[in-house]
Amino acid sequence: MSSAVPIKQPSVPVEIPPGTPEWISADLIRDTLVTWQPYYRKSLTVEAAIEILLDVGQLIALLGEP
């Protein structure tokens, strides 16, 4: 029996801005907004979610360097 709580996805469609890396999908942006929004008082934007994803990507790349 699973005790996982379903995560609500924002119902607003996500429009990916031009210049966004291809690995960042609309679903990934939605997941990022759902995950991080509880930690911010202001509503996060799509652009903020992309910035979070890029920053986390850079951190992971840095930690993976020998």
Image (tube, rainbow, N blue to C red):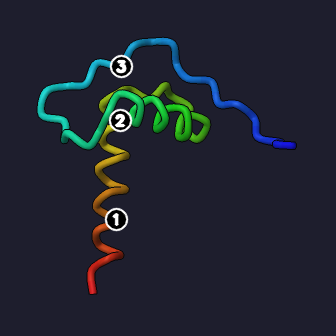
Q: Residue at x 28, y 18 (%)?
A: 15
Within 10 Å of disc 1 (Cα), the crowding (few <14, some 14-19, many 20+) is few
- N-terminal label among 1 and 3: 3
Mark in the foreground, 1 or 3? 3
Q: Distance between the residues labelled 1 and 2?
A: 16 Å
For label 2, the residue is 48
Pick whichever of labels 1 and 2 is earlier in the sequence.
2
Question: Residue 59: horizontal and vertical position, in percent?
Answer: 34, 65
Amino acid type, mark 2: Ala
Q: How far apart are marks 2 and 3 (CA)?
A: 13 Å
Local crowd size for mark 2, using a 10 Å CA cut-off: few (<14), some (14–19), many (≥20): some
- The quarter of the image holding the C terminus is bottom left
**Residue 37 % position (x, y):** 54, 34
Picture layout, residue 64 above or below residue 17? below
Three-letter amino acid code at disc 3?
A: Val
Q: Mark 1 points at which residue?
A: 59
Residue 14, labelled with which disc? 3
